[in-house]
Image (cartoon, rainbow, N blue to C red):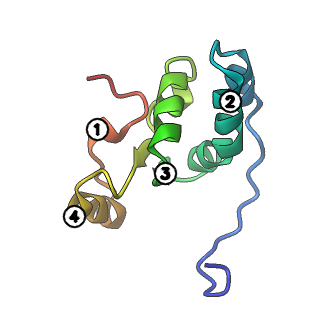
Amino acid sequence: MVARKKLIALNIGENSDIREEIEGKEIPQSKKDAMLKDCHLVEAALGTDRRIVSLDDTARILFAGLSDNVADMRDILWVDPDQNEKQQVIAWLECGQGDPKWKLGHKD
């Protein structure tokens, strides 16, 4: 992506509130480590258009659990193109209409 000049470099810093919530969560350290490794995705989404496209459904589930305590995260749309209807994902990327169930704070 860098060689094709498709990467847009952003200067988005760490979100200490989110990182503190991760550290304080009563979950195994391995899950905390996984969340901290991928925390930059959430920070970038909060600093831009609140969208994440990732094949890592495990991370999505972990961050969805964290969104109960971090209100800013609830409206992040996180989609896994392998798990969701591909045509819906393409339409979402083109026009911005995402399925509400893709929000981290969505409750069934």
Q: Residue at x 47, y 29 (%)?
A: 64
Q: Which mark is residue 52?
A: 3
Rendered image quadrant of residue 57: top left
Q: Which mark is residue 87?
A: 4
Q: Which mark is residue 30?
A: 2
Please tell me which of labels 2 and 4 falls first in the chain: 2
Q: Nearer the viewer, mark 2 or mark 4?
A: 2
Q: Position of residue 98 (x, y in %)?
A: 30, 49
Q: Which mark is residue 100?
A: 1
Instruction: Judge by depth and name the residue closer to the eye, 75 or 26.
Output: 26
Farthest residue, direction bottom: 4
The answer to whether the residue labelled 2 contacts the one labelled 1, judged by CB atoms less than 8 Å apart, is no
Q: Which mark is residue 64?
A: none
As measured in the structure, the alpha-carbon distance from the residue carrying label 2 to the one carrying label 1 is 29 Å
Q: Is 101 rendered above or below residue 108?
A: below
Callout 4 environment at 10 Å: few (<14), some (14 to 19), or many (20+)?
few
As measured in the structure, the alpha-carbon distance from the residue carrying label 2 to the one carrying label 4 is 34 Å
Please tell me which of labels 2 and 1 falls first in the chain: 2
Q: Amino acid at mark 1?
A: Pro
Q: Amino acid at mark 2?
A: Ser
Q: Residue at x 71, y 68 (%)?
A: 9
Locate the C terminus and report the quarter of the image it occupies: top left
Q: Is residue 85 left or right of residue 16?
A: left
As measured in the structure, the alpha-carbon distance from the residue carrying label 3 to the one carrying label 2 is 22 Å
Q: Position of residue 78 (x, y in %)?
A: 43, 45
Helix, strand or loop at mark 1: helix
Helix, strand or loop at mark 2: helix
Q: Position of residue 107 (x, y in %)?
A: 32, 23
Q: Residue at x 59, y 43 (%)?
A: 42
Q: Is 47 rendered above or below residue 68?
A: below
